[in-house]
Amino acid sequence: MNSARPWPTLVVASALTLVCAVAAGVAGSAAGTELTRGPSTAELHAAAKREVAERWRAWPAGRIFPATLPYSAEQGGQERASRIGISPHTSCDSVDAKAAKALRKAGCRGLLRATYIDALRGVLVTVGVAALRDELGAARAKSAFNDSGKPVPGLRPLAFGNTIAHRFTPAVRQAGSVRQAGPYLVLTTAGEVDGRPGSAVGEPRPAIFSFATEISEHVLTGLSTPRMPDCTAEEWQC
């Protein structure tokens, strides 16, 4: 007669089965909670950051470069610069060669350009939006551009045939600027409508080009200001 007592083994097996069942239940509950919970604050901020980084590609060109942009007039009050045209090209080479190299090294994803004219119709400004892979890349690329108000090295003007901007060539440039926020650089280059070369101008008149920086800041603010996701809206997937 076998005198072995099998019940302790059965008890252990039963206990292990119960533990596994409880663990499976906890895991299933956690997975269900993970699938049904709303996004966390950190996830919402991450989504907002990703949305900002894609605006240069996702937004309509007319939203990035509005038909008019406000600026402060020299004599007081407010004027508006009018858009002449937007380039369909997004090449990161629309800047001087040295700056183009820096943009590519920093991870340039695209460069958008539009040309505006001031309210008095005497000054042309090309505004450029360079989209970098991240904020650090944008900060590094910024150092390749002249930040003293001079146009070189900087953005190349965008001319449009059969318009008042048809003579806006690189030689016409007299002023430039660069601003950075998030993964974006916003650049400007400015010159006079009559097409006179910058080298032919006598005493510099920086005041007549100062509005260029102001309108570029409007563009930069629009592109770089985060917006918290709205999970009830069709444009967001939470």
Image (tube, grey):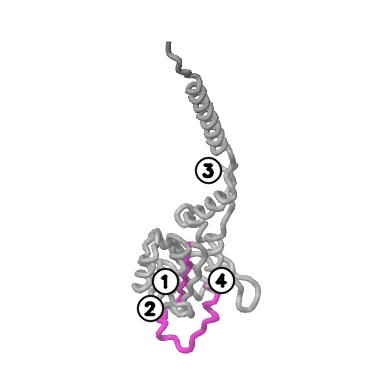
> Residue reaching furthest bottom?
202
Whether residue 172 is in magenta: the answer is no
Residue 206 vertical position relative to residue 99 in the rendered view, above or below: below
Q: Secondary structure at mark 4?
A: helix
Three-letter amino acid code of the residue under disc 4: Glu
Whether residue 101 sits left or right of residue 133 in the image: it is: left
In percent of the image, x 40 and y 66: which residue is there?
160
Q: What is the span of residues highlighted in magenta in the rendered image?
A: 183-212
Given the image, on which type of amino acid does mark 3 rest?
Gln
The residue that mark 4 highlights is 214
Q: Earlier in the sequence, mark 2 or mark 1?
A: 1
Residue type at mark 1 is: Leu
Q: Is residue 28 left or right of residue 153?
A: right
Which image quarter holds the C terminus?
top right
In the picture of the structure, the residue carrying the numbered disc 2 is: 171
- Which numbered disc covers residue 155? 1
Q: Measure how far apart labels 3 and 2 are at the Cα level.
A: 48 Å
Residue 157 rendering spot, x and y as whole percentages: 41, 71
